[in-house]
Each structure stands twice: as C-alpha cells, then as structure tokens.
Amino acid sequence: MTASFTLDPVELAAVVASLDDATAPVTAAWSLPPACYTSESFYAFEREAVFGRSWLGLGRLEQIPAPGDWFSIEVAGEPLLVVRGAGQEVHVLSNVCTHRQHLIAEGTGHVDRYFRCPLHSWAFERDGTLAHPAGMQDTEGFDRADWCLPRLRAEVWHGFIFANHDPEAAPLAPSLAKLEPEAEAYGLADLVTTEPWDTDVLPWNWKTMHEGGIEPFHSHFLHKGLHEFAPWADFHEFEPGDGAVTHYTRFREPDQSFNPIYRTLLPVFPGLDEERRQRVMFVAMLPTLYFGFMPDHVFWLLVLPESAGSIRLRQGYLVHPDARDVPNFDHRIEWIADGLSAYFRDDATANASTQRGRASRYARRGRYASEEQPLPMVNRWLAERYRAGYRKLVPEQAATFRPRLVAP
Ligand code: FES
Ligand SMILES: [Fe+2]
C-alpha cells in the first residue's frame, strides 16, 4: 500500500519509545500514551501499520450463502466488497471503481454475473475482473486487464471471513490455534448469524472498544449489580504471534446469560462441557472482530474506525441452526439484544468519557490493576505492528532511533 498520510515523527517516536513499558507484565506496565487514542496523525499511521497489515474480520459466510451474494463494508477508510464466487469461494475486493472512483455497490445484494458501477456502467465480474469498460474503445493504450478491482487475500476461520491488504502476511489460522478447542466445542463453523446491523458513529477510539470488551475490572463498578451473576474472571497468557486476546468470566451457576432473568434464552450448545456452560469467553481478534462465547449464543461485533476518535459497529448473534425453530425465536433474540444493550449503554458512556479525558493536556499514561491484565496483552498485539510499521514507514528515523523511557 502507498503511505499517503502525514506522519508526526516526534509523536510516533514517543509512542515507539513507550512500548517497552506498555508491554511489560501487568504489575509493571503503563498504558499507551493518550495521543494513541486521539491523534489523527497517529491514526493515519495505524491505517497502514495495523489495518494495512493485519487480518481484518469482515463478517460471516452465512451473510453470502449463494454464488453472487455480496455485502459491502468500510474498514478504516477502505471500502470493500465481500462476494461469493461461482465456486462458493469468497472474494474480498476493493469497492472503488477503477475508472473514476465511484463506489461499486453499497449495502447487501446479489449479482447474477456482473457488478455495474452506477456512474458509467463499467461491469466487473464477481472476482473483480473488468469485463466491460463502457466507452473506452477510442482510449489510447487502454487494456482492460490493467483495470480490474484489486483483490485482497481472504481467509475463512470457522465461518468468520477475514481479509488482509498485505499480500505477504502470514496466514491467519496458525495465530488462532489456541482457540481451536473453543471453536470446536461451540461448533462455531456451523453456527448461523442473525442479520447484522450497523450503529451510528460512536465517539471513541477503536482500541477503547476492544479494551472495554476485554478487561473485566470495570464490571465490578460500572456494571455494578448487572454483573453480580458473573463475578470471577480468569486469564490466558498472550504470546508473541497470537492473533487474539481472550479472557473468560465464570457465572455463579450454569447456563446463565446477560439479560434481566440471567438465564439462557435459547437451547444450550450441545458440545459444551460443564465448565463452558458456566462461563463466557470474550475474544478480541484485533483490530476489527470482537465476540463472546455464551452457552446458547455467540455475540459478535466488528469495530470499524472512522477517525481517531470515532467508530461504527456492525453486530450480530450466532445461534445453533436448530435454534431458529424454538418458539418466539425473534423475541428471544430481541431479549438477548436488550440484555446486552444494558451493559453497552454503561460502556458507551464510559468510552465517550475516556475519549474526552484523553484529549486533555493533563492526560497521562496510566498504571494497571492486576485485573486489567488483558490490556498490556492488547498492547503487545499492537506493539508488534507499531514497531514493524515504524521500521518500514520511517526507516531513516528507525535506523538511528534508540528507545528511551519517556516521562509518563
Ligand atoms: S466511475 Fe465507475 S464507471 Fe465511471
Ligand atoms: Fe463493560
């Protein structure tokens, strides 16, 4: 990808210098500099170093069951089209017309053969091949083979569709190997999603969304009362190369859930042992996908940055295919959504508040409580990409730069 942004080298160097502290064990760690959450210059760096080089969760296979089915999505300023090809393969294409940059298609739909750009009707195959470039017969040196839609590398992990802008990226699945037993136990590949829906723009940084979802410490306070049924958190170690940060929280009893009656509302997944029936496992597959394994459903959301200080979310629920036959299925899904939205409202208020706080001249790097240990793990996932991006994008500074401890 081309580096089309303005770097602030001083700010970037300060962030790189902060990474040793930020990735230390929780008892010694410091949070990232507040500018990492508020600076548009730093977000521009992340668009390349993180979103330009990581596996981006984009949705589920069930959203595009038949050849020609498609949906659009925009991730950190990149409009994309996710399409089922003739042989059931998944294509992830740039959604930007190679003629004069009109977006090819927005929303969801089906094409029998071609996408037609609305502006001048150029026709693209479902794999991005330009089939009919209207009106170009007199244009000198025009070869339609040069004007196909860029196609990203795509990978499917247990029904979740991922893509990567970086053709050199290591495959995704090995980085998620630790989660294989969970995915198998919940039958993740065979679950089906409810129709995903998008939120409006929300006023906080994309990392804040994952941090709020993956650290259990705030639940005792921000969600006081609501969270009493699920008081015990436990952690997994995060090792270099891991593609996800996880933690789980145990319920007081089996088959509990985040809703006003604290009980599962759908049949419990058949493959769960006693332990899994009594816990929720939260998974942050940074930078976009976040989900939670519950005993009867998996809630999932995509964190889609719009700027340093804003995101949209796309959300859905995965259920067992047979669960749709349960009486009042739609109402039960609404109750699940209502239940989770009580927590989300608390989290939204807190996320918006910290976003404002981080813009203050008095905002400092913070220390962590031991129950916040997933946060330095998130920092470790980020630091791998920040360091690599810094070496690649600012080679002259990186060559001479010696990390030093910056005053927090
Ligand atoms: S911009 Fe798409 S055909 Fe002209
Ligand atoms: Fe929360």
Image (spheres, grey):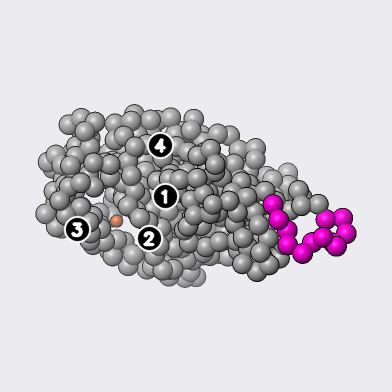
Sequence-earlier tag: 3 or 4: 4
Answer whether residue 6 is visible to the viewer in this image.
Answer: no
Structural distance between the alpha carbons of marks 1 and 2: 12 Å
Q: Which mark is residue 120?
A: none
Structural distance between the alpha carbons of marks 4 and 2: 21 Å
Q: As drawn, is 282 to the left or to the right of 12?
A: left
| Label 3 lies in ligand 2 vicinity (Cβ under 8 Å) | no
Instruction: Give the label, 3 or 4, closer to the camera.
Output: 3
Quadrant position of ligand 2: bottom left
Structural distance between the alpha carbons of marks 1 and 3: 21 Å
The magenta segment is 131-142
Identify the amino acid type marked 1: Gln
Q: Position of residue 270 (x, y in %)?
A: 21, 33
Q: Do the CB atoms of the residues marked 3 and 2 lie less than 8 Å apart? A: no
Q: Do the CB atoms of the residues marked 3 and 4 lie less than 8 Å apart? A: no
Helix, strand, or loop for circle 4?
Answer: loop
Structural distance between the alpha carbons of marks 3 and 2: 17 Å
Residue at position x 81%, y 52% in the image: 143
Q: As drawn, is 100 to the left or to the right of 172?
A: right
Identify residue for label 4.
158
Circle 3 crowding by C-alpha within 10 Å: few under 14, some 14–19, many from 20: few
Q: As drawn, is 354 to the left or to the right of 94?
A: left
Seen from the viewer's position, the closer of residues 382 and 301 is: 301
Identify residue for label 1.
63
Answer whether residue 239 is visible to the viewer in this image.
Answer: yes
Sequence-earlier tag: 4 or 2: 4
Identify residue for label 2.
197
